[in-house]
Amino acid sequence: KLLAELKSVVNFSGQASFEEVTPTLGKYFLSQFGNILIIAFILVFLSVFVIFRSFVPSLTVTFGAVNDMIFALGMMALIGIPLGVSSIAGLLMIIGYAIDTDVLTAIRILKRNEGTVEQRAYESMRTGLTMTSSAILSFLVLFVVSLIAYVPTYYEISGIVLMGLIGDIFTTWFGNAPLLMLYKRRKERT
């Protein structure tokens, strides 16, 4: 009925399909979320270890992703976003984004040799904050639009990612970057 009304107003060709997630399927996804997280963090740790061949960068990148997720989960509880199938998508996005900024920082501080450690960290911070600011602005627009238009799925995803990005600023630039700088200085002395 809705599709027929829409076709009378907007001329389009194509088909539409609707799928419903049953409570049983949703419960299964939620029960598997813990397993997915454990596997994701193990794969992150191993991937970073292969790149740097050291435990310190692997631990800092994994720590950053875990910390961002904990921050987002805490903020979800604070503003009342339930843990559901759509919020899991937002949390998985947070893991990906945290890894991106932390690996960028680690590569610039540990793998590059031009300039001082502080200069490389500063350049990394400029790039990382530009990326994060752009993403925050994008998800803020999505958050406001989904709040006004009442689209719960987009509201949950954008709210979670927005909070995780804010947490990522603190985790990356006040946690991971100083640890990596300290590690690089100690490694250069030996």
Image (cartoon, rainbow, N blue to C red):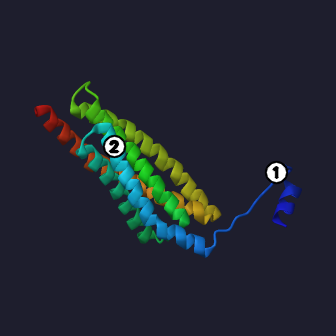
Asked if residue 102 can be seen in this view, the reply is: no
- Name the spot of residue 56 as percent of width and height, x first: 23, 45
- At label 2, which amino acid type do we have? Val
Could you tell whether 84 is left or right of 109 in the image?
right
Classify 92 as above or below 122.
below
**Label 1 sits on residue:** 14
What's the distance in space between the residues labelled 2 and 1, CA to CA? 44 Å
Tell me which corner region of the image, top left, top right, bottom left or bottom right, holds residue 4: bottom right
The label shown at residue 23 is none
Could you tell whether 61 is left or right of 140 in the image?
left
Asked if residue 139 can be seen in this view, the reply is: yes
- At label 1, which amino acid type do we have? Gly
Q: Residue at x 54, y 66 (%)?
A: 85
Question: Which residue is farthest right?
Answer: 8
What secondary structure is marked by label 2? helix
Tell me which corner region of the image, top left, top right, bottom left or bottom right, holds residue 38: bottom left
Could you tell whether 118 is left or right of 86 in the image?
left
- Name the spot of residue 161 as percent of width and height, x first: 47, 56
Q: Residue at x 37, y 49 (%)?
A: 44
Q: Residue at x 86, y 62 (%)?
A: 5
Question: Which residue is farthest top?
Answer: 114
Q: How many marks?
A: 2
The one of 136 and 34 positioned closer to us in this rendering: 34
What secondary structure is marked by label 1? loop
- Name the spot of residue 75 as percent of width and height, x first: 41, 65
- Name the spot of residue 49 as percent of width and height, x first: 30, 43
Locate the N terminus by quadrant: bottom right
Question: Which residue is farthest left?
Answer: 190
The label shown at residue 48 is 2
